[in-house]
Image: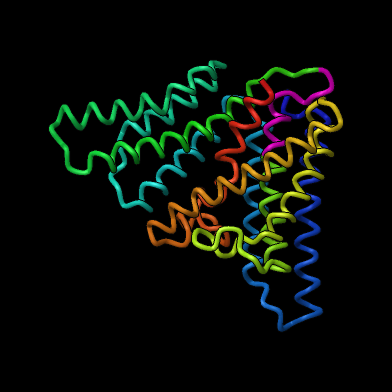
Amino acid sequence: MEAMTAPLQWAMGGVFAALVTASATTSTLARLRPGLELSEVRLRVRSWWVMAAVFVVALASHRIVTIVFLASVAVAALWELAKMTKAVVPPVAFLAYLAGFGAAASGRSDFLVAVVPAAMAGTAVVLVAFDRPSGFMHRVGGTGVAAAVGVALAHLAALLTLPASAGSAGGAGLLLWLVIVAQAGDVAQFLAGRAWGRRSLAPAISPNKTVLGFVGGMVTAIGLGWGLGLLLTGHAWWWGGVLGAAVAVAGTLGDLLISAIKRDCGVKDAGSLIPGHGGVLDRVDSLILAAPLVFWVVV
C-alpha cells in the first residue's frame, strides 16, 4: 500500500519520536521546577498524541478512508465556523464541501476552482427564489467564506491523489510533508513567541502572534521542509526548503484569517473539541492557504 512505504514509515516514526521527546521534556521540567505552570503544555501534548495517532491511522488506511477522514475534518471546521458566526448554515455550503472533496477524490481538481462561485451563486438564487432580501449579503458572503475554507481543505485530498514520481512517496508523502511542516511550524511559532516574542505581528487581530515567533516558525518550516522533502517528495534538495518557507507564510496568513473572523465574532476559540487547542478550525487554520499553495505548485 502506498501509504506504508519506507519513507512514510520513517516520517511517521519521527513524528512520534518528537512527541516522546515533548512528553519527556514536560515531565522532566515538572520535576525540576515544581512551581512552573505546565498544565496547558501537558494538555496540548496529550492532544497532539491523539491527533497524530488518528491522522497516521487514516493515512495508513485505504485512500477512500483517508479522504473520508479529511472530509469529516472539513465538515467539523465548517460547523464550528457556522456556530462561531451565529449564522444559519446555508445547505449550499455543505454541498460545496462535498463537491470539493468529490472532485479531489476523483482526480478532477480542475473543478475545485468552480466550487466557490457556484456555491455563492446557488445561495443567492435560493434567497431570491424565496424572496429573502434580509441578510442577503451576509448569507451570500458567509457561504463564500465557508465554501472557500472547504475547497481549500479539499486540496489535502487532492494531494493524496497525485501519482508517485521517482524517489517520492507519492501523494501520501506530499500530504504528510505538508501537514508536518505546517503544524510543526505552527508549534514552533507558538513556543518561540512565548519564549522571546515581544513585538506583535498583527496586534489588532492576534496580539499573541509575534515577529520573533514567526521567525521561529519560518526556520522550523524551512529545516523540516528541506529534510522531509528529500525523504518524501523526490524533488531537488532546495525544493523543500523554499516551499517550506512559503508554507510558513501561508500558514501564518491562514491563522490570521481565522483569527480575524474570531475577533469579529468576539470569541477566543472556534470550538472546544480539542483540549488545549480549541476547535478543529483552530488546528487546521494553517492549512487553509498552504494546502492549495502546495498542490498547485506541485501539479
How was the colour assigned to the protein in this rendering? rainbow
Above or below, 149 against 253 in this view is: above
Above or below, 298 against 287 in this view is: above
Tell me the chief SS of the magenta region: helix
Left or right: where 88 falls relative to 268? left
Q: Residue 112: x, y in percent?
A: 49, 23
- Which residue appears at 58% of the width and 62% of the height? 276
Q: Quadrant of residue 188?
A: bottom right
The answer to whether residue 256 is visible is: yes
Spot the residue most to the left.
Answer: 131
Q: Quadrant of residue 106?
A: top right
- Which residue appears at 38% of the width and 53% of the height? 84
The answer to whether residue 45 is visible is: no
Image quadrant in which the C terminus is located: top right
Q: Residue 24: x, y in percent?
A: 80, 64
Q: Residue 28: x, y in percent?
A: 81, 71
Left or right: where 271 falls relative to 9? left
- Which residue appears at 43% of the width and 52% of the height? 261
Per the image, is 1 magenta? no
Image quadrant in which the N terminus is located: top right
Q: Nearer the viewer, residue 125 or 276?
A: 125
Q: Quadrant of residue 265?
A: bottom left
Q: Residue 118: x, y in percent?
A: 36, 24
Above or below, 112 against 182 in this view is: above
Q: Nearer the viewer, residue 2 or 219?
A: 219
- Which residue appears at 35% of the width and 41% of the height? 142
Per the image, is 172 magenta? yes
Total numbered labels placed on residues in the image: 0
Write down the region rendered in magenta.
166-178
Spot the residue most to the bottom.
Answer: 35
